[in-house]
Amino acid sequence: MKQIQYQYDPEHFRHSDPNKYNSSKLKSEEMILSLGPQHPSTHGVLRLEVISDGELIVDVVPHLGYLHRCFEKHAESLAFGQTIPYIDRLDYLAAMNSEHAYVMGVEKMLDLEGKLPKRIEYIRVLVAELNRLASHFVAIGTYGLDIGAYTSFLWLMRDREHIQRLLEWLCGARMLYNYIWIGGLFYDLPVGFEERCLEFINYLKPKMVEIRELIIENKIFVQRTANIGVLPLDLAINYGCTGPVLRGSGLKFDLRRVDGYSVYPELDFEIPVGKGEMGTVGDCWDRNFVRVLECDESIKIIEQCLVQLMGDHKRTRDFNPQAMLPKKVRPQAMDLYFRAENPKGELGFFFRTDGRSDVPLRVKARACSFHNLSVVPEISRGAMLADLVAIVGSVDLVMGEVDR
């Protein structure tokens, strides 16, 4: 006789993911609605418990599911270098940036900060900014899709594909790269990469003008996003928001400038902030406009890196990107926190080491998407139900960071 493996019970869901609100305690005109989880926008992980009064939102409660990523436990059972593939899977849309942050933290513990060849540093910044462009293209394109604009999504995915092919040529992977290593790189740039990258940048500049006209300055887009989901600066700071979500509220805070890591202090670029040009400072339109402006700044950074990589720090026969890789990563006993500016905000890693093992005692990831998600209920109350999708989309969440 076969044993029953699973017995359906309508109460299973209520027990596993209980609502904050009880229907018996609601006012007569209020309703409990569940938005999500669905793929691709919330990746089967985020459910929003919405209390509505007709078309108005009374409250929003985010319910976090599980991707079963277990990043921090993996990092505490593997050597430092073996963790890098797991780093890629945090913000899988910006894996190069995440690798850069983690590797610089480990290098600081090993006293390698500022000692690597400049060619390595410029290559790291080059690929990180290419990945920042790719991440922002997804953010802007899918946001247009969320509120009904299909063409913008197709155009930005087309341009993102050029970046994906460049990075695939570089390291063999389209999204999860394992390219930036502790003390160096997996490999030098392929021959001709700099020239191909420059061709892409020259192609992209007029496309960015088209994107601004198609989306950001579009009358329908402005009406759907201006004065919606306004995030005051003091509230953004109190909730620990970072990245375009914080800068959209008017604060010029970018770790590439504030902390000045890698070769960013040697590069010329601006920090865009929201100014309320179409509505109120800190609204959905400002957050997306900041991302568009950041794409322009990333293009400037990439051009400057290419000048260096084809000039003073061009490839030579004796250049070995793995020359400074430590055979055994065994930092001294210490606690260290290192942070860097990812496309979505501040990604930080806390390390605790004992000085004897090449496996850390503790690794904690400070994920920007987690903090940015926490402010969604505050900026959604009182909004129309139809605007909730616009508010959540403007925050640009990746759930791989939220469920670590």
Image (spheres, rainbow, N blue to C red):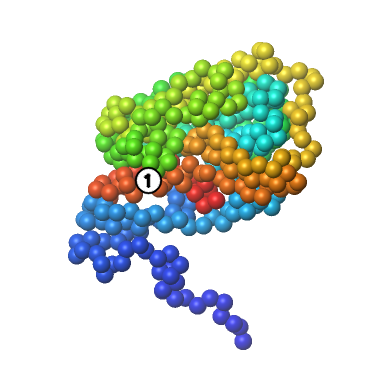
Could you say which quadrant of the image residue 11 lies in?
bottom left
Vertical side of 305 occupied by 242: above or below: below
Q: Quadrant of residue 273?
A: top left
Residue 84 in percent (x, y) is at 66, 42
Residue at horizontal 77 percent and vertical 22 percent from the top? 319
Please tell me which residue lies in front, 265 or 386.
265
Taking depth in this image into account, of 269 and 288 the one nearest to the observer is: 269
Local SS, label 1? loop
The residue positioned 80% from the left and 20% from the top of the image is 318
User: Picture quarter containing residue 62?
Assistant: bottom left
Nearest the eye: 308 or 336: 336
The amino acid on which the numbered mark 1 sits, given as a three-letter code, is: Val
Instruction: Please give the name of the residue rendered at 71% of the width and 40% of the height, measured from the top-left corner.
Output: 332
Q: Is residue 92 visible?
A: no
Rendered position, 336 above or below 319? below
The outermost residue toward the bottom is 1
x and y percent of residue 24 in the render?
26, 70
Query: Badge 1 is on which residue?
Result: 375
> Where is 253 relative to 313, above or below?
below
Q: Quadrant of the N terminus?
A: bottom right
Vertical position of residue 145 compared to residue 44: above or below:
above
Give the residue furthest to the left: 28
Image location of residue 180, percent across then percent down: 66, 34
Residue 226, visible in the rendered structure:
yes
Answer with left or right where residue 51 lies relative to residue 17.
Answer: left
Q: Nearer the viewer, residue 362 or 165?
A: 362
- Across and down, in percent, residue 278 comes to 28, 29
